[in-house]
Image (cartoon, grey):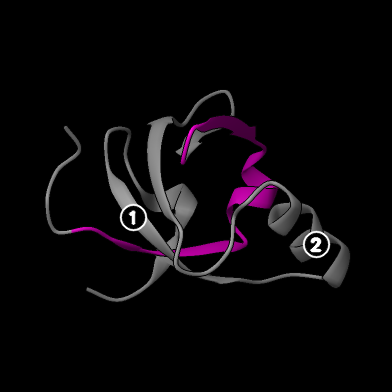
Amino acid sequence: MSDIALTELRAGVRAIVSAVAGVASRVDKLAAMGILPGVELLVHQKTPVVVIECGETVLAVEHELARDIRVAPCESPAS
């Protein structure tokens, strides 16, 4: 499966971050939150903000920021 924007995933789906796009300050902000290529994420909800689990951390990410996160959905469903 090809890479898609994080905002395109539905709740309950796991994905691996493949790239983080955008201006340097935005990339730095995401990196500071632990969102880096190779990291696995789990989408908990999509509205009103995208809520993701990244390791032991749960983060609320604005849609504008989430669009800059490119991911590859995992084959197996979240448990």
Percent position of residue 30, x then y: 70, 54
Query: Going 46% across and 31% down the picture, which residue do you hit?
Result: 46
Badge 1 local density, few (<14 within 10 Å), some, or many (20+)? many
Magenta region = 55-74
How many marks the image carries: the answer is 2
Which residue in the rendered view is the most extreme toward the top?
Answer: 48
- Amino acid bearing label 2: Asp
Query: Going 75% across and 64% down the picture, which residue do you hit?
Result: 27
SS of the residue under disc 2:
helix
Per the rendering, the mark at residue 65 is none
Percent position of residue 24, x then y: 84, 71
In this view, 23 is above or below 54: below
Of residue 21 and residue 48, the one placed in the foreground of this image is: 21
Q: Which residue is mark 1?
A: 15
Q: CA distance from mark 2 to mark 1?
A: 20 Å
Q: Is residue 37 magenta?
A: no
Using residue 42 as the reference point, say whether residue 37 is left or right of it: right
Q: Is residue 68 magenta?
A: yes
Which residue in the rendered view is the most extreme toward the front?
Answer: 56
Percent position of residue 17, x then y: 46, 63
Badge 2 local density, few (<14 within 10 Å), some, or many (20+)? some
Q: Quadrant of the N terminus?
A: bottom left
Q: Quadrant of the C terminus?
A: top left
Quarter of the image for residue 36 reads bottom right
Using residue 34 as the reference point, say whether residue 51 is left or right of it: left
- Tell which circle, 2 or 1, labels the residue nearer the N-terminal end: 1
Query: Going 59% across and 55% down the picture, which residue do you hit?
Result: 35
Per the rendering, the mark at residue 28 is 2
Of residue 64 and residue 54, the one placed in the foreground of this image is: 54
Using residue 9 as the reference point, say whether residue 30 is left or right of it: right
Which residue in the rendered view is the most extreme toward the right?
Answer: 25
- Amino acid bearing label 1: Ala
